[in-house]
Amino acid sequence: MTKLIDKGLVAVFFIPFLLNAQAIWDTTKYEKLNDRFIVAYFQSVKSFNSEIGQVTLKDSLNQSSFNYFAETNTSQGVELNFDKINLQIGFKSRSPKATDKYGQTDFFNLGFNFGGNRWFIESSYRRYTGFYDRNTPNYDTSFKRTGQYTLQPNMNAILAKVKFLYFTNSKKYSFRSGYACNYRQLKSAASWVLSGNIYNNQQTNDSSFIPLIGRKYYRHFADLNSIRVTGFSANAGFTFNLVLFKAWFFNLLATIGPEQQWRKYGLINQGSGTTYSFLSLSGDVRSSMGLNLKRFYLLYSFTIDYTAYNNYIIEYNSRYISNNFTFGWRFKAKTPAFYKKFQQTKFYKKL
């Protein structure tokens, strides 16, 4: 497995070196803002949920399905952009829901992105602690009276991921104009997208994921308290920017493809278990819209990241949803001498 993961990392990080053509674009379609240091503030509403179900026994009352949510509600952060480099740091700011019913979720997010419009690498780290089960009303008869969800305060989820994106029509289409905004798409354009992902996703708990009432449906997985997955996928899709008056824009990107996964299911008092190999499906859907001017920009972006971890007993689906509102300002800035040297390298010119 280690050799396969290493090959996946090589594919993600070294594909750009195989793209020998220098990045040249149609300046009537989009412009690059070379001398700008961008500082942005964002607020977001994010949610991460894991849906757990079983496929072996009939369950007319739906008492064997669980949907664990970690809702960060409102979070905020700072985004810094210069040329090809993008850094995001976000923290949870408040939980408007009643913590006695929904519990408390601790959340941290860190993102680092690098690249241009020809290819782009996104890396992210997300950590959640504290979940509640939205399916509680299906099996807890006291819910109508108390409104109390089943809480898993020590359930922890960590996702570290690297995504590679390659755009076939980078001469006319600017991906970054809809998200990082150090480019401005001036006229509408579209492109095919090739994507590769490598990630490690782990969800753990101090007790079983399965409440007592549902354990009879899960056989030996009744004591499941951890799942650790390393995955590698190759996706393809389509994206476009719709632009009005060289300022207002709408972007949509969607990819889908097969994913090779290596999973470990951990049972209480039995360790992390054996590694199993699975072929699954993964997808990425995102959209943004907003106003992109010379100095100022504001945008709303929406992202869904979905992965399935199903086997002969369990259906386990992981879904990350993010809604972001960002506004930023581009400051006039001189390019540092060391960075100018980097801009003259062959590697940089392939971006």
Image (cartoon, rainbow, N blue to C red):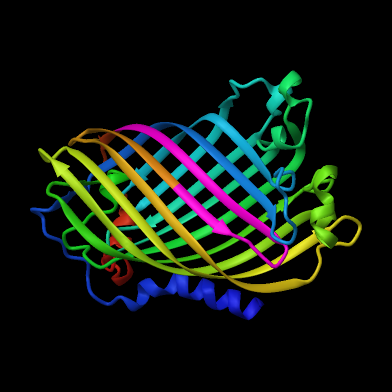
State the residue lying farthest toward the bottom. 3
Where in the figure is residue 320, as x and y percent of width and height?
53, 46
Q: Which of the 4 image quarters holds residue 119?
A: bottom left
Where in the figure is residue 196, as x and y percent of width and height?
44, 67
Question: Is residue 123 found left or right of 269 in the rendered image?
Answer: left
Q: In this view of the protein, can residue 342 be seen by the observer? A: yes
Q: Which of the 4 image quarters holds residue 39?
A: top left
Question: Is residue 156 found left or right of 239 in the rendered image?
Answer: right
The vertical placement of 305 against 119, above or below, is: above
Residue under the image location 83 percent in, 60 percent down: 219
Q: Does residue 306 show up magenta in the picture?
A: yes
Residue under the image location 68 percent in, 27 percent down: 102
Residue under the image location 81 percent in, 43 percent down: 211
Residue under the image location 15 percent in, 50 percent down: 188
Where in the figure is residue 318, as x and y percent of width and height?
59, 52
Question: Is residue 277 found left or right of 44 in the rendered image?
Answer: right
The vertical placement of 156 against 307, above or below, is: above
The prevailing secondary structure element of the residues shown in magenta is: strand
Quadrant in the picture for the C terminus: bottom left
Decide which of 155, 332 is in the foreground and name it. 155
The magenta segment is 304-328
